[in-house]
Image (spheres, rainbow, N blue to C red):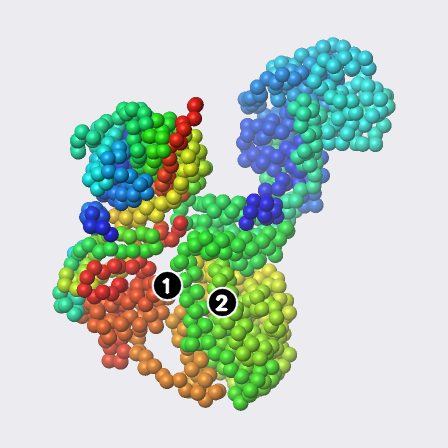
Amino acid sequence: MLKSVITKALYKTPILQRLTGPVLRPGGLGLTRESAMKCGLEPGHRVLDVGCGYGAAVKMLAGEFSLLAWGIDSDLDLLRLNPGKSRIQARAQTLPFRSNSFRALFCECVLSLTPDMGVTLGEFGRVLEPGGALVLCDIHIREKRYRDQLKNIPLICGFRQALDKQEIQELVQGAGFENPRWEDLSHLLTQIAGQAVFDHGSLVKFWADVFGGECPSSLHTCEIIRASRPGYFRIIAKKKKQREKI
Amino acid sequence: MRGKEREEKADMITNLGIEENKEWKCLPCDCLLKLDRVRIDYMNGSFTVELPLCPSCGMVLVPEEIAVGKMLEVEKLLEDK
Amino acid sequence: MDQKKLRQVEKQCIQEEAPACQSACPLHLDARTFVDQIAKQKFSDAWKTLARSLPFPGIFARICDHPCEKSCLRNNLGGPISIGALEEFCVNQPRPRIRTIPMPKKKFTMAVVGENLSSLVAALELLKKGYEVTLFTAYDRLGGTLWDLPDTLLPDKVVDQELATLYTLGLKVEKKTVDGDALADLLNEFSAVYLGLDTPETAPLVEKELPAERTFALKRKGLFAGGFNAPGQNLQSGNISTNVPPMTQAFQGRAAALSMERFTQKVSLTEGREKEGPYPTRLYTSLEGIVELLRIEPENPETGYTEDEARAEAERCIQCKCLECVKVCPYLAHFNGYPKRYAREIYNNATIVLGDHAANLMINSCSLCGLCTEICPENFPMADLCLDARRDMVENKKMPPSAHAFALDDMAFSNSDSFMLWEHAPGSAKSDFAFFPGCQLAGSNPDQVIQTYQFLLANQSDCTGLMLQCCAAPAHWSGNESKTGDGISLIERNWQNMGGPIMILACSSCMEMFKLYLPQIEVLSLWEVMDKVGQFDQTDMPGKGRPDSRSPVAIHDPCTTRNQPQIQAAARSVAAKLSIPVKELELSGKKTECCGFGGLMENANPDMAKKQLAQRVGESELDYLVYCAMCREQIRGAGKRTVHLLDFIFPPKGSVPDHFNPDPADRPKTGLSQSRENREGLKRDLLEQLWHRTEPETDEAVLHISPRVNEKLEKRRILHRDIRAAITHGESTGCKMQSVNNGHFLVAHRPSLVTFWVEYSPAQAGYHIHNSYCHRMQVIERKGTGGKS
């Protein structure tokens, strides 16, 4: 019904980039910085930013925390604008790294863009050292019943496959992580929404501008996302020290 | 906010779509208000927008259409969580 | 509210209960929908509705004995809808493709004995569920007595067509007479066995045993039987009545089939089957306004209804539904649902309407007036639901501040030094009674507070004190339990300070609060007192300024008197003594409607309050008589001429005799700012006039405000005192802006959580106010002034 032939990605639109800054997601670099501090990392530790985009977070982690910071992204366009040795093109579900090689892994507002979140989380578990930290930030929804309609949004964005809190926690635990600590950071999403209102005049107009003009797609996207009551979360979880045989 | 964060925020100014102010001047400083970056807060949200303010003392003008328009909408957004 | 409470509350709303026809039908055919579809000439859809509930619809629609018609509500209004005849009509229309999606095959095998209807239905049900069914009959073909029916009623080819379904679903038929021994074999071979007692040969097999109620199980495990008449019927062979009604045959066959399935699954045979078969429905449908329309009979009984006749008869259907509360309440109607749905939504904290903050708005828009509870046949507690939800929201910090902020501020003002007061009568050292006028009367008509107080002193008891403060209703309505507690404690303290007098309350909302939270305090309604002691001598009433006592007025009871009939009676008695001809509105007394102020509806959702008022004032052409100041303000504000009972008792102060003495019914709504000023002025005047104490007066500047600007202020809830405070701030600090075009000043002032902007210019005395607006967002200024705006 609302199928679009060419589906663009929300995170690549200049409109969104103006709201989020170079990290292309809520929370800014400040969020990554705070997460890194919570992980108790030390200089020389190897860390990976999955979905590094322009590489702003990788640069920050290397510069401010003296970490050996790597980044991967599947989108060549973003990597190309800011190339570097430590940033590689790859997919999150098949990471080009040895097992047990990272002390911490950051995946911010990216998991919900991958086709199979369970598989992706499994891959994260593989490359992390036992006891290594997963920092997972993403969108979640509080009204599950709009899930099918969210899938139909003609735009690549985290809302499309967003799950609810329980499902996410189950997935994380199922991938071999223990004691996932859930923090609700929905105010970061509200922050972006508020900024969007100031920029565009209203949320309806924001989505209209994203789609290049008010249309059934923009109105539908706006309503469905609003109805699904999205929020933003952070989970910090450690990979089990003794990996269970699957 | 740390210096780096302020820099990052600096790239996120919004132009609220209001025209350059030609009507109001700051009385004590006797100068016309000009558009500049200002921070506005409410509940958990903090936004940087462009509003007319006095280049000398910093007094800010919030025009009526912003106060009962976009500001009100964002207030409602932040309240309804 | 937990799940259990939700289910309880949901049950009280009967809107989703089945209509009488459906609940009376043993197979629960949705006759209401079916008839509606016939009326709309959607015959394919009607066919499908039949097929959904009736086995062999082509057969049943023709031969069904329609017990539903006995329950039809039109029985006394022209005759029940001819559901049976309409079914017959429908199945004579072309049959649409009705697909039965077969269930996955199950490994159990079932035996059915007999070839009459109940056996056929049992077989059909089991086949549809995916079981392998073998039917045993002594005859060559299935159908039994069906073939004996006249062709005009049930054509042979219809029987063929319908029974073909059995073969399509894979029915196996064995020609065999089943005797006692054979039955034993069947019980061994098959998972369960059904005996159709409507087939004469089968009856002796049960040996006069009656199948169990509801489950149709016999004593022998795995054996079930159906197709007999009501319990008590003799089951001797030969006595078996082949006149078992077809509906009974079908119902029992179907019920037995379900039992057989459960038996093989080893689950309870009885669980959850209370609504199987006919039962009395809880749905209530009002017959008010339904005109008697005679049942339409077919012109030609042989051929049945024509299309037009069928449509006309179907249009007679009332389409039973409740919606009693929705009919009277604009709020319930506004959200396009009914209480059961709303209860679920409130519990899920979800939105029905995709849009702006609808869930919170719905919860905050209810006036809590209780009319729906009164009207509902099951007393659905919508007010409780909403108030609980508000309390949850406040506790979990999810209540949007702007919903009730103004009302709570107003309450704080009434409890501040500017208004709050407790005094014994002038010259007295104690109080047996105390008059509590409430903040709305004080704000609306401060003179009448003084007059009423003096009246009480003169006529009721000179040992009557006076207490001015807020009764905490705004806090209670907003769901803020802590602020409510504070307000109530304040009343209690002042009451104790006064020596615990009997309180005389002018306002019925105050009365509700006292009864709820301060049961230890003895309270009287001002109207009961007036009725008892008032002597309203007509002769010395001055002619001018008195509302015209001769033209009838419609009396509006405040919603908080709903369960206080004695107050309603007292007010009417006083009106009668004043010779006011009073007419009753349709929704009055116990069924009175809210004026839109209750529950803070006016605060949280002014548009809803407008709708509410529009309905109320539209109910009569007459002027309205009220005895609550809130109602006066609201109803007057909606454009209706409104007079308060006190306007009759205390005519307005006449000014110069030959000036036009204003008619109280015309007095415009007191605005928000004026209300505050009135309250402040009242305390000052009282202390001065009665207790001879003068407070130092603050010299307040005059504000010149045009009506257009004033309307803006009212809408934005900006008070004159807010404007004065802002100007004072600007003038004293010099922090203001000036327009280079017209020299107007513009100042910002943030005394607490709101920033007020005022555009003004000095006048000869005071200030001209050109514009004003406000916002809650806070501007953080970077340098210089060190202030925030």
Q: Nearer the viewer, residue A235 or C729?
A: A235
**Residue on which the image places disc 1:** C715
Q: Nearer the viewer, residue A127 or A224?
A: A127
Q: Nearer the viewer, mark 1 or mark 2?
A: 2
The answer to which quarter of the image holds residue C457 is: bottom right
Disc 2 secondary structure class: helix
The numbered mark, 1 or 2, whose residue comes first in the sequence reads: 2
* In the image: residue C421, left or right of residue C239: left
Residue C449 vs C98, above or below: the answer is below
Q: Position of residue C678 (x, y in %)?
A: 42, 76
Residue visible at 32% across and 25% down? A99
* Label 1 Cα crowd, 10 Å radius (few <14 / some 14-19 / many 20+): few
**Residue on which the image places disc 2:** C486
* In the image: residue C497, left or right of residue C413: right
Q: Position of residue C252 (x, y in %)?
A: 72, 27
Residue visible at 27% across and 78% down? C766
Residue visible at 62% across and 66% down? C564
Residue type at mark 1 is Lys
Residue type at mark 2 is Asp
Q: Nearer the viewer, residue C120 or B61?
A: B61
Q: Nearer the viewer, residue C36 or A149?
A: A149
Q: Position of residue C712 (x, y in %)?
A: 33, 64
From the image, which quarter does the N terminus of chain A lie in? top left
